[in-house]
Image: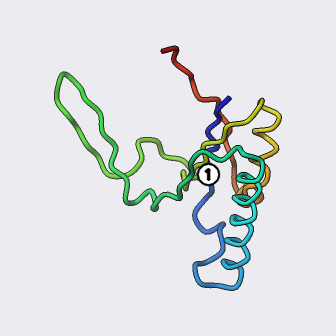
Amino acid sequence: MRYMALIYSADGTSPEYGSPEWGAFMAAYAEAGKTFNERGVFRAGEALQHTSTATSVRVRGGKTETMDGPFAETKERLGGFYLLDCRDLDEAIEMAALIPTAEIGTIEVRPVLEFGG
């Protein structure tokens, strides 16, 4: 079953880009990715630019409306995701716990809704 692992953290909780801590943080991400590949669960994953670059889109009465930033105001922001194909929720949770941001933020694990075809 496919699971989306959504990676959330608050601004200022991740190591600063270019710092020695940043290198170790990214090395931990590389190690998690290696495990995902070795276990055969990795399907996709990307980091996202800061929420300040986001545009929210909605259609009301046939008119497209846009607004800067995410629609919801939250302390934690969505910073990236992994799409993992795991045998069950337990394995998905095991894999999510390997994502380094789990130690400073939150990883939301959600099953992908599979439409019959």
State which quadrant residue 34 falls in.
bottom right
Quarter of the image holding residue 111?
Answer: top right
Amino acid marked by disc 1: Tyr
**SS at badge 1:** strand
Q: State the image coordinates of residue 36 (x, y, percent, origin top left).
A: 72, 51
Residue 55 in percent (x, y) is at 33, 49
Q: Nearer the viewer, residue 28 or 85?
A: 85
Q: How many marks?
A: 1
Residue at (61%, 69%) from the top-left corner? 12
The relative height of residue 86 versus residue 12 in the rendered view (above or below) is above
Image coords of residue 17 (percent x, y): 58, 78
Residue topped by disc 1: 8
Sort mark 1 into few (<14), some (14-19) or many (20+) by Cα contacts within 10 Å: many
Q: Residue at x 61, y 58 (%)?
A: 10
> Where does residue 1 sit, x and y in percent of width and height?
68, 29
29 with respect to 68 (left or right): right
Q: Residue at the location (71% across, 79% down)?
A: 21
Q: Which residue is depicted at the point 57% across and 64% down?
A: 11
Is residue 52 or residue 41 the one in the foreground?
41
